[in-house]
Image (cartoon, rainbow, N blue to C red):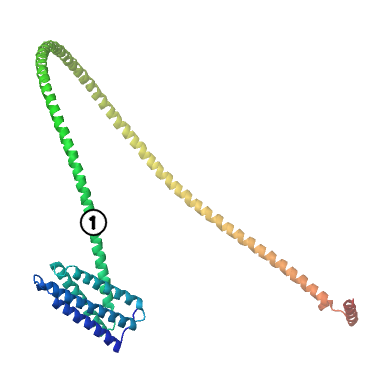
Amino acid sequence: MAAQPGGVEGLRVCTVLQDCLDQLAVLGHIMPVTYEGRPDADMIVSADVGQVLQEQQAVEMRFKEVMSSRWRDGAGLAQVTGELQKSQLQLSQVLKNSPLTPENLSKVQRDRQFASQVISEVLAELQEAGTIQSLLLAVQAQKERKANLHDIIVREEEGRHRVRALQRQLVDIRQEKELELQRREEMIAHLKDQLQEMKAKTGLEGKYVKNSAELQLYQGNKINTHSENELQASIQHVQDKIDKETRVHIEVESFLKENQNRLEEKLEMWMERYERDTEAKQQELNLLKSTKANNLTHLQELAKKYRECEQLVIEDRVEKETARRLREQEATESSAAVKIQSWWRGTLVRRGLGPFKKGKKGKAKGKEKGKKKKKK
């Protein structure tokens, strides 16, 4: 990042930029569009523009010296100054080539206005914030604009090449279409000849077909007459069969009616037997139900007796278990009492208490024995 100018140096930079603005304003006044058509315009324009360009170059040199003396980071500033010099050189080249054409005059005016606007913004930014960020942004925008113009020119060139290729392709297609049209005209002539041949052949075939159809019609009539006679014979045969079938149907119907009557009589007999058997089975069922009820009552009584017996058995087992536990407890207590008595007697004997108490000699001897045992 560039350092911010301050004090007298900032004022010098602002003065240089203001001088640039004045020079651009003078350039705008001495190069109006109204000079076009005047006989002395070439002399006026060449003299004024040469002077303005010299002054512009001097201003650029002063601006470069002032800015390089104030900013430590000279790389970015040198780049910006180079871009400004490049734009001014392009402007001078345009003016030197043809300064009086309407396109050049309008371009000079646009470039002058753009340079004036950029310098005004830089001057305002220097006065307010002390930076030249707007100048860097303007240069970057011009770079992007030139890059876009270059892309447009490249795409236009590519489009021209494609148009040329398409035109060549169109010529080839036209030639192919002409050849194809010629082939089709030849094919049409050939088909016309074939059509004439087919018409002649169709006339001959039509006569042949007509004669053949008449012959087939005659043969068909004879065949139909023979078929009609055969069908009449078949109809008579079928009618005889129908009469026979009718007689057979009547006989079968009478036979079926007789069988139906016999079957109805059998059905009545079987219905009566069914009712009798049903009543007998119902009586048996009632008897079985009553027997079942009696058996159920007896079973309930037996179950009650079983539960009572089972309760008695359980109570007897509980009493026996209680008695067994009491016996075991008594035996355990008796054994414990015997052991306690044996221990107590042994204690009395060992210590010589109670009835087992000994005299003094006995005690002295006991003490001597005890001492001897300790010595050992």
Q: Nearer the viewer, residue 318 or 127?
A: 127
Q: Reply above or below: 250 against 341.
A: above
Q: Is residue 370 left or right of residue 131?
A: right
**SS class, disc 1:** helix
Percent position of residue 351, x then y: 82, 77
Question: Residue at horizontal 64%, vertical 64%?
Answer: 326
Total marks drawn? 1
Percent position of residue 56, x then y: 23, 78
Question: Residue at horizontal 42%, vertical 46%?
Answer: 296
Q: Quadrant of residue 352?
A: bottom right
Question: Residue at horizontal 21%, vertical 54%?
Answer: 160
Q: Reply above or below: 307 against 83.
A: above
Q: Nearer the viewer, residue 205 or 235?
A: 205
Percent position of residue 341, x then y: 76, 71
From this viewpoint, which residue is outermost toward the bottom? 7
Percent position of residue 61, x then y: 28, 79
Is residue 116 visible in the rendered structure shown here? no
Q: Is residue 372 left or right of residue 132?
A: right
- Residue under pointer 1: 157
Q: Is residue 312 left or right of residue 32?
A: right
State the quadrant of the C terminus: bottom right
Q: Nearer the viewer, residue 30 or 321?
A: 30
Q: Reply above or below: 224 against 13.
A: above
Q: Quadrant of residue 170?
A: top left
Amino acid of disc 1: Glu
State the quadrant of the N terminus: bottom left
Is residue 278 visible in the rendered structure shown here? yes
Q: Nearer the viewer, residue 319 or 54?
A: 54
Badge 1: how crowded within 10 Å, few (<14), some, or many (20+)? few
Question: Residue at horizontal 26%, vertical 67%?
Answer: 144
Q: Quadrant of residue 140?
A: bottom left
